[in-house]
Image (cartoon, rainbow, N blue to C red):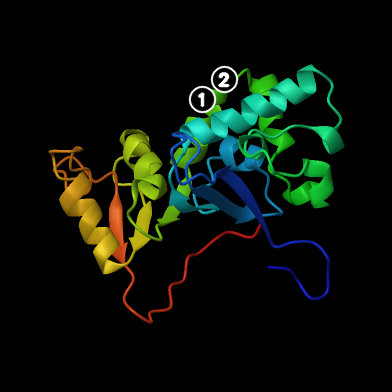
Amino acid sequence: MKNDKSTEPYFQLTILGCSGGPIDGKTCSFLLKPSKISYYDIILNSINDCVIGLDAGTGISGVSDLLLSKLNNLRYNIDANNERNYLLDLYLDSLPIKDYNLNDKIRFNDLSLVNLMQDYKLSPIEISVRLINLISSYLITHVHLDHISGLVINSPIFQQNSKKLVYGSEFTINSLKENLFNDKVWPNLYSNSKGSLVNFKVIEKDEDVSMDVLEN
């Protein structure tokens, strides 16, 4: 994750949700991007190959919650070392953010997203939709609802014939196709005459998978 010649991290991990239930809207989902590229630049320049989703239990709602949390901290002039975080608030035994000794550059927030709202007068939902639509790939560990619900619910905003890929085991991909994107539980968005919104990729046992991510 880090360059041996530098203390600068290669990647920034953003936690959108970490609950396995019963709390809906906060379920397992993480975003991974190069630390040198801000979300501000990714969204403003519509860069497609910078953000990877690790599981997709939440999406648009998770990003929006992070933005609103950051806005409230700024609105009430809460110091960064004492700011509250909605994920930590879910668990009574959680430490305050300041006690985790997290580097500011890899903390849960990205202040540049707040700048987008202020500079371009975009709402949290507008920013969230743009960011989710720019995720290049999703890696789904398994097909439980707390790991896929955001992918399903958010899928209608994906662009036609996009390069977005959803990776998973054969069991996971087959389950998504047969049990969800089947025109019964949810529309079939992976084989549509007008263009696919979701593209699936099976990871075979012992297969090494490479996902291209721009570094600058």
Instruction: Give how far across and how far down residue 68 sits, in percent.
Output: 63, 24
Residue 62, percent across and down?
53, 35
- Frontmost residue, 170 versus 88: 88
Q: Give the labeled residue for mark 1.
A: 126
Would you say 126 lies left or right of 202 here? right
- Please name the residue shown 20% across and 38% down the image: 186
- Quarter location, residue 175: bottom left
| Residue 73 against residue 215 in the figure, above or below | above
Q: Is residue 144 visible?
A: yes
Tell me the residue that label 2 is attached to: 123
Whether 39 is drawn above or below 114: the answer is: below
Q: Residue at x 44, y 39 (%)?
A: 133
Type of amino acid under label 2: Ser
Q: Could you tell me which quadrant the N terminus lies in?
A: bottom right
Disc 2, disc 1: CB below 8 Å? Answer: yes
Q: How many marks overall?
A: 2
Confirm whether residue 103 shows in the render.
no
Q: Residue at x 73, y 51 (%)?
A: 106
Counting from the top left corner in percent of width and height, residue 73 is at 76, 25
- Outermost residue to the front: 93
Task: Say which element carries label 2.
Answer: loop
| Residue drawn at the location 28% of the way across and 44% of the way down | 197
Mark 1: which amino acid? Glu
Of 201 and 78, the residue lying toward us? 78
